[in-house]
Amino acid sequence: MERRRLIGIVLLIISAFTGTIAFRLATPAIAFYTRDTLKASMIAVSLVSMSFVLARAFSSILGGLFLEKGKKLVYLGAMAMMGNALAVQLYPLTSSWLQVVGIKLLNGFLNGISWPMAQFVIAVATPKEIRARVTAVYFFFGSIASLLGNYIYAYTVGLGLSGQMWISSTFFVLTGFIMLLSYYLLYGEITPRRERTPGESPSLNPRRILIIASLMAVIVAFTSGEITYVYVSEALGLSRERTAVLLGWVGFLSALLSYFVSWVADVKSEARMVKLTALLAGLSPLLASIKTAPTVFLGVFLALFAFQSFRPISRKVLASYHRSSLAIGGINALQNISTFIGGMLFGFAYSLGELHGVVTLNLALLTFLPISLGLIIEGVTLKE
């Protein structure tokens, strides 16, 4: 790769790091503020998490359509990222969980514009033969930042929500500036829409990839956002700080190992790796429902590992589609809608309580089993 393109790609990877620090610091802070200070129910906490992903779903499609109108609009993604810096300053001013939901909708809309554009640019700017691995590195740096963001949260609890949001704002602004520079350097590589050429097709059926993406997102929704911190803390009786640190490490390790799945997908078989991720994601809620520390954390790990392994493969496949910006925006939208459904299902089913026997089972997570079966069947029957 020429130097200009390499620098642009490296900057985008750095933006995944700085942007995720901003987001991950805010997530547990808002989760425990909503649950403990505002005394919200688990359904309300689910609404806080899922309002974010619902708004992000809508704006993900919007961002893809924007780029098809003119690639100069890619700079809008960087500006949207900076907009998060203002949005998070509103959280300390809230006095009810409904107000938190409203700000989460704004955060979700801004993130839906910014992140799918970054994923699209790094996918199309990277040579096809290393695309899955480079995209995996991009997501991996986000996971390193997720771990660091959880640590920052744990060590800044004494600052209160207001102090933590100022740190988050600083990283959001920095991320926006990094994105602006990256898009300037990679501008010549950005091709949101190409003419379809005879015989051209992605390596896997895009429709099947979208179905698998949707089912997987429903299942792994219990590892998404505020509800994860509250569930793990209450299920295992852990403090807020310890919960954040442990979940940070689980996310980091799952992302680290997911790189090897991307490597196999690049050099051997994408279909086999999709089958593997579908199987692991399908098993994750069953394990996480067993209320012991090893099984809860293993279930969370498998869900994150499967999802993080599947993301770069799916982006690689859809980057080969002739309307790549819309396709990548579309899969982001579909996964966010599915995460909303899964998160709300978990929130409403949380009141079902537990099943006590040889082991104690969380019934809310067991409600995902029919969807898990559908995901495993879709994965096993996928053909290259």
Image: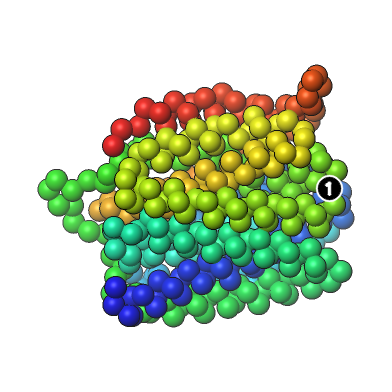
Q: Quadrant of the N terminus?
A: bottom left
Q: Identify which residue is drawn at 46% across, 61% down.
A: 137
Q: Does residue 236 sit above or below 63 in this rendering?
A: above
The answer, for residue 324, to whether it is visible in the render is no
Q: Identify which residue is drawn at 63% across, 47% down.
A: 224
Instruction: State the residue in front, 170 or 92.
Output: 170
Residue highlighted by disc 1: 238
- Snapshot quadrant of residue 252: bottom right
Q: Identify which residue is drawn at 40% across, 57% down.
A: 133
- Snapshot quadrant of residue 357: top right
- Snapshot quadrant of residue 346: top right
Label 1: how many Cα within 10 Å (few below 14, some 14–19, many 20+): some
What is the image's colouring? rainbow
Q: In this view, does 142 lie to the left or right of 95?
A: left
Q: How many labels does the image show?
A: 1
Farthest residue, direction top = 357
Q: Position of residue 148 (x, y in %)?
A: 67, 65
Q: Position of residue 220 (x, y in %)?
A: 59, 40
The amino acid sitting under disc 1 is Leu
Q: In this view, does 107 lie to the left or right of 349?
A: left
Q: Where is residue 330 in the image (x, y as percent from the top left)?
A: 41, 49
Instruction: State the residue in front, 140 or 324.
Output: 140
Q: In this view, does 281 lie to the left or right of 195?
A: right
Q: Where is residue 337 in the image (x, y as percent from the top left)?
A: 53, 43
Label 1 sits on a secondary structure element that is: loop
Q: Identify which residue is drawn at 75% across, 27% down.
A: 361
The answer, for residue 289, to whether it is visible in the render is yes
